[in-house]
């Protein structure tokens, strides 16, 4: 296969980028009063404004030409059809099947997996109803009041981010907690106030081998046993979500308490499966289905819409434009809605674990920048922390601003202030303020000439910093489902454009393997002499300090 850089469509973009680097968005807006109409689009629950990017119609034309050149539409079909596009693991990529709200069959290896998904959803539904109505009892006959989800990465971030985002939709019949860190502080803090007779643990692990999760699950099991004096209480208090049912059985979880998932669902794309059980327990099953419906509608949009009006495609192409062609190295996710406070952490895994790679499909080293590092924080908190960097540092950080027209928790006088900041920040990042204006403003304030000469350079904002604005009508299960699916497909498209295998994660294996070896050394006390001097020094210091 040819390398991306040898494509004419790629080379044209490189040439175009060298010209666009000298263009300021202010000029682009002045030259075209219709710019917003041309570079924005509406979806059922959100508006996407991408006009504040350093692009013109020519840029988009070239980006769509590249997308066609590399057969993006065919790749899209291949994913939805269940082809094994995760070829390093020989797996299909079918998280879209988990939220297939149509009756359309999806056949994988001769099996209609839509039926399997429906069966699993039905099991989830009856379980959720039993627990939420109090019919499911703990070992001493008391109803469950607290759910503790034990899982990490995709088995934690998606469910926790959604639970946090949709808090206002919960009837609080259950309190849902999350334990992901193997640092015992977290599980100790979570368990301290809980009554073991009323707690349900979900051990959520696709592989059921993840050390951190297994360590936490064993601690939870002991905690329960020390209260119930009886390991058989596990039947009333533990369920599992996993592909590896054998390991869950060995752990002691009852067969009927094990929810399945499939190897065609990547961990970071799995919140739509039984991995989403804590969401359904918290909100009720109907709202979980609304979440799936929101995602399904974006799947349809992504699958059916021509590239030019396709929101995930546009977001992906802009990211490639900003990072690969214009050289940005990081991207900020800036929610202006308290409910999305975990969104950047969630997208960090979704994007960086998917596309943070440097070898292409053919195993060749990639010689162009791939995806940026993803970071972020609630917008308002960020404004008083790192926005200085966004406005005036030498590094340009393209940013996604995500806000809502209507707050889920209206408090008089708050939402307008919040959104005024959203609008102002994207405007300031784009427009900046030049020296003439800075000097005029200072003069109007009666400042002396010396003061103006000294301070003016520090007050200049170059502007021209790209942002996308995603304006949701309101955060709801439906709109949140749509937002997440929008980013999932964006990540897929980026991977295809950059020729990256987005659905494996070999890069996390090396550290895992070494940690296991070092843990053995720590517990046996027999340190290997194969470590470098830094690692040996650190371990020695740790061990010596422990003995004091
Ligand atoms: O270490 C990375 C990872 O494999 C993620 O991809 C995954 O979401 C997470 O660990 C948890 O894996 P599991 O669900 O198998 O415990």
Image (cartoon, rainbow, N blue to C red):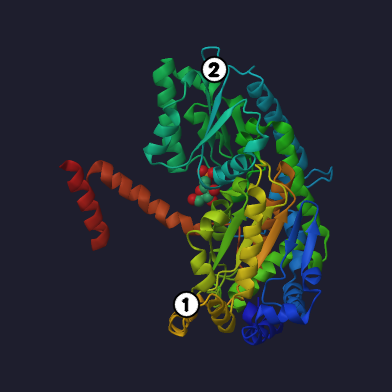
Local crowd size for mark 1, using a 10 Å CA cut-off: few (<14), some (14–19), many (≥20): few
Residue drawn at x 63%, y 40% is 261
* Secondary element at image label 2: loop
Label 1 residue near ligand 1, CB within 8 Å: no
Q: Residue furthest top?
A: 141
Q: Position of residue 246 (x, y in %)?
A: 54, 34
Q: Position of residue 410 (x, y in %)?
A: 67, 42
Q: Quadrant of the C terminus?
A: top left
Query: Viewed as shown, does residue 515 lie left or right of 432?
Result: left
Q: Is residue 371 above or below residue 3?
A: above
Label 2 residue near ligand 1, CB within 8 Å: no
Disc 2 to disc 1, how far (Cα)? 64 Å
Q: Is residue 448 above or below residue 315?
A: below
Q: Residue furthest left?
A: 548
Local crowd size for mark 2, using a 10 Å CA cut-off: few (<14), some (14–19), many (≥20): many
Q: Is residue 189 visible?
A: yes
Q: Position of residue 347 (x, y in %)?
A: 58, 55
* Secondary element at image label 1: helix
**Quadrant in the picture for residue 366:** bottom right
**Mark 2 or 1, nearer chain start:** 2
Query: Viewed as shown, does residue 101 lie left or right of 198?
Result: right
Q: Residue furthest front?
A: 446
Q: Position of residue 404 (x, y in %)?
A: 69, 51
Nearer to the camera, 98 or 141: 141
Name the residue beneath numbered marker 1: 458
Name the residue beneath numbered marker 2: 138
* Marks 2 and 1 in Cβ contact (< 8 Å): no
Nearer the observer: mark 2 or 1; the answer is 1
Query: Viewed as shown, does residue 142 lie left or right of 123?
Result: left
Q: Quadrant of the N terminus?
A: bottom right
Q: Is residue 527 visible?
A: no
Residue drawn at x 67%, y 33% is 283
């Amino acid at each position: 296969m040819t390398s991306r850089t040898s494509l004419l469509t790629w080379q044209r973009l490189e040439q175009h980028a060298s010209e666009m680097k000298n263009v300021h968005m202010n000029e682009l807006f002045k030259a075209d009063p219709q710019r917003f109409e041309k570079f924005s689009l509406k979806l059922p629950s959100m508006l996407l404004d991408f006009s504040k990017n350093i692009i013109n119609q020519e840029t988009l034309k070239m980006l769509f030409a590249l997308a066609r050149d590399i057969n993006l539409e065919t790749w899209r079909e291949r994913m939805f059809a269940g082809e094994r596009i995760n070829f390093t693991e020989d797996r299909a990529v079918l998280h879209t099947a988990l939220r297939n709200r149509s009756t359309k069959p999806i056949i994988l290896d001769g099996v209609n997996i839509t039926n399997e998904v429906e069966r699993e959803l039905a099991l989830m539904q009856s379980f959720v109803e039993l627990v939420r109505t109090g019919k499911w009892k703990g070992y001493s006959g008391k109803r469950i009041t607290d759910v503790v989800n034990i899982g990490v990465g995709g088995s934690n971030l998606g469910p926790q981010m959604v639970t946090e985002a949709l808090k206002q939709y919960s009837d609080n019949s259950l309190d849902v907690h999350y334990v992901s860190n193997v640092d015992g502080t977290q599980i100790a803090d979570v368990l301290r106030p809980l009554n073991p007779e009323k707690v349900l643990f979900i051990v959520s692990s696709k592989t059921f081998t993840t050390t951190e999760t297994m360590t936490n699950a064993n601690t939870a099991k002991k905690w329960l046993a020390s209260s119930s004096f009886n390991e058989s209480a596990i039947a009333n208090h533990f369920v599992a979500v996993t592909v590896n049912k054998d390991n869950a059985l060995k752990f002691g979880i009852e067969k009927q308490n094990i929810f399945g998932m499939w190897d065609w669902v990547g961990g970071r794309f799995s919140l739509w499966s039984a991995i989403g059980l804590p969401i359904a327990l918290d909100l009720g099953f109907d709202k979980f289905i609304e979440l799936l419906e929101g995602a399904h509608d974006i799947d349809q949009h992504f699958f059916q819409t021509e590239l030019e009006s396709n929101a995930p495609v546009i977001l992906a192409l802009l990211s490639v434009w900003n990072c690969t062609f214009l050289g940005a190295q990081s991207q900020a996710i800036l929610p202006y809605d308290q409910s999305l406070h975990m969104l950047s952490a969630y997208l960090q895994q979704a994007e960086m674990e998917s596309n943070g790679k440097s070898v292409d499909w053919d195993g060749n080293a990639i010689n162009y920048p791939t995806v940026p590092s993803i970071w972020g924080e609630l917008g308002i908190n960020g404004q008083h922390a790192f926005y200085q960097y966004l406005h005036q540092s030498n590094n340009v950080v393209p940013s996604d601003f995500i806000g809502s027209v209507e707050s889920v928790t209206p408090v008089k006088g708050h939402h307008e202030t919040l959104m005024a900041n959203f609008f102002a920040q994207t405007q300031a990042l784009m427009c900046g303020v030049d020296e003439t204006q800075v000097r005029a403003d200072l003069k109007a304030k009666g400042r002396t000439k010396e003061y103006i000469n000294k301070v003016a350079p520090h007050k200049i904002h170059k502007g021209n910093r790209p942002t996308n604005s995603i304006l949701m009508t309101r955060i709801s299960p439906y709109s949140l489902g749509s937002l997440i699916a929008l980013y999932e497909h964006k990540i897929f498209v980026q991977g295809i454009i950059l020729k990256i295998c987005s659905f494996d994660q070999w890069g996390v294996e090396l550290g895992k393997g070494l940690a296991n070896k070092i843990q053995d050394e720590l517990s046996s006390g027999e340190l290997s002499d194969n470590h470098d001097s830094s690692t040996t020094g650190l371990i020695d210091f740790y061990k010596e300090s422990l003995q004091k």
